[in-house]
Image (cartoon, coloured by chain):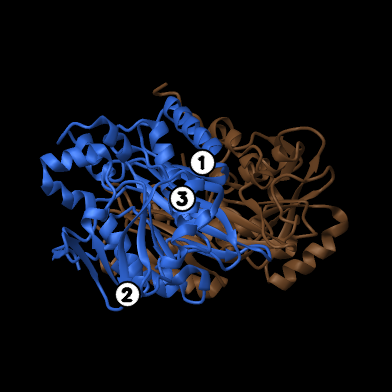
Chain colours: A brown, B blue
Amino acid sequence: MAGRRLGQFELIARYFAPLAKGFPGAGDLKSDNAFLPADARHDLVVKTDTIVAGVHFLPDERPEIVAAKALRVCLSDLAAGGATPYAYQLALALDPAWTQRWIAAFARGLGADQRRYGVVLCGGDTVATPGPLTVTITAFGHVARGKGLSRSGARRGDELWVSGTIGDAAIGLLAAGGRLASPALENRYRLPRPRTTLGPLLVGIANATADVSDGLLADAGHIAEASHLALVIERDRVPLSREARRILRAEPSLWANVLGGGDDYELVMAVPARRRSALLKAARTARIEVSPIGSFAAGRGVRLTVGGRTVRAPRAGYVHF
Amino acid sequence: MAGRRLGQFELIARYFAPLAKGFPGAGDLKSDNAFLPADARHDLVVKTDTIVAGVHFLPDERPEIVAAKALRVCLSDLAAGGATPYAYQLALALDPAWTQRWIAAFARGLGADQRRYGVVLCGGDTVATPGPLTVTITAFGHVARGKGLSRSGARRGDELWVSGTIGDAAIGLLAAGGRLASPALENRYRLPRPRTTLGPLLVGIANATADVSDGLLADAGHIAEASHLALVIERDRVPLSREARRILRAEPSLWANVLGGGDDYELVMAVPARRRSALLKAARTARIEVSPIGSFAAGRGVRLTVGGRTVRAPRAGYVHF
């Protein structure tokens, strides 16, 4: 078997999804979140994410940033599930070089984000590893009973919307690697800003949601696949920051990174046309821009159009694997 | 700071417990489990544990055993909390040598334990790591509202009871390392048997509980400390397997391992004398032996007595850190 490697999704589908049969709230592990019945009016939304030094963040990253990133990637999934975050568990595997100073700064970073996002630590584990620092967070949120959002549920004719701007993190990753200069975008890569205020407002508005962690095309494609629909994305409607626009003008080949790169932590949403004004109102309440960039139709697959012509999708999305 | 290292408990108390203020169910992170309000009649009991290849299990351990160990150490904590297990999340950081064959066997191991313990996978994450294989499980269980058990709550005069036999895993670890021969005990070290049938029956009987993961003296000591009491343990009442008794006869210095070593995954319980018959009945129902080995009194600290004389406790317990 050595040398034959499956991707993360295939691995989960083949070996782990069968273990989640009989747990309706696990959605065959195709959903990012698990939904556990809580009280009569709520579901508990649960999401686990692991980040590893040198794989998901730079090995010399500041501890406050590592803490924030670990927490925020989970909160981003909860937001995509329509959940209001609540608490989290922390499993910390400390590498041999750990110091008290590092831990103190890491804990300060968590504390700052606890205040920012209204969550609180409720347990966990701390161990030593001879390998790289590894942080696993399991985050908990609440959503109205049965109302949690997931990748499945988009309908024919739904519009695809996206929050904020796309591609900043992917360009920021190049900047972090010294490939180009853009301190602002480098920061977008290093520090996700999960859309926790928008997510819960999407309940009753969006038919399906995902966060952009693997890349716009990949994550929007996951919605299409889970909803058994085809998706067309119009490249020129994809919202860009001023900085990304400037860099793309100089180097158009970076569109592949913008559409295929991960770590944006924006929300993509399938929204029926009749709920457009409700969506715009929710976005105003959350003070977050949203943009329509495509639409769902019967069929399968994701098409990218530029100036009305279909082009080859740059790549299937960055998978940390 | 380099060179100055804190233990796991000190680290948690200093840096992480402040982050859990305001979450009553976290018990200042002194409890192994977190208690989240679920429905009107239940609390959701949550426990996270991480195991790392080469630290918590042998690097060449069989994948089925790794899976079982990862799950069972969590289930053991839920049992100590009085909870009936229900579901779990899995975060898997795969080392560079992973193969499909390994994953398939690992998933089979989880599947077998799902049937054995009545739990189901409800989500998680799979990532690659350049370091050793690392498995984090967050397990969920239910307990009657407000009735969850923890280390605190023991009262003066309570007897200390322990389930099963103590020290088999510690001797088994020596066997696994080739220091002595005992295939049976080696198996006890490799494969915990969490007391999931006894744990939920202790609600209403035990005032405080812990599982023996760090060592009998350490874990019983945690109950004493969390309950602000002193504890006396009579060494000669500590229940031993026939095999452990034989080995201890040949090598009495191994008492230090028996009382200080970890990984027994038995339950230690503080039980008032008036509930002794209720405890014995619960133990019969669960088909698990329980033995009284000491008692709680006003004061602080843990004393070990041998033949009525206080001896120096061999060590404070094995800490994987």
Identity, as a three-letter code, of the amino acid under mark 3: Ala
Tell me the quadrant of the picture where the N terminus of chain B can be found.
bottom left
Residue A87, image quadrant: bottom right
Q: Chain of mark 2?
A: B
Q: Position of residue B283 (x, y in %)?
A: 46, 50
Neighbourhood count class around disc 1 (C-alpha, 10 Å): few under 14, some 14–19, many 20 upward: some
Q: Position of residue B83 (x, y in %)?
A: 53, 55
Circle 3 residue: B283
Q: Chain of mark 3?
A: B
Tell me the quadrant of the picture where the C terminus of chain B can be found.
bottom left
Please name whichever residue, B167 or B75, is drawn nearer the observer in this view of the structure.
Answer: B167
**Distance between mark 1 and mark 2 Cα atoms:** 52 Å
Q: Secondary structure at mark 3?
A: helix
The numbered mark at residue B229 is: 2
Q: Position of residue B126 (x, y in %)?
A: 48, 42
Identity, as a three-letter code, of the amino acid under mark 2: Leu
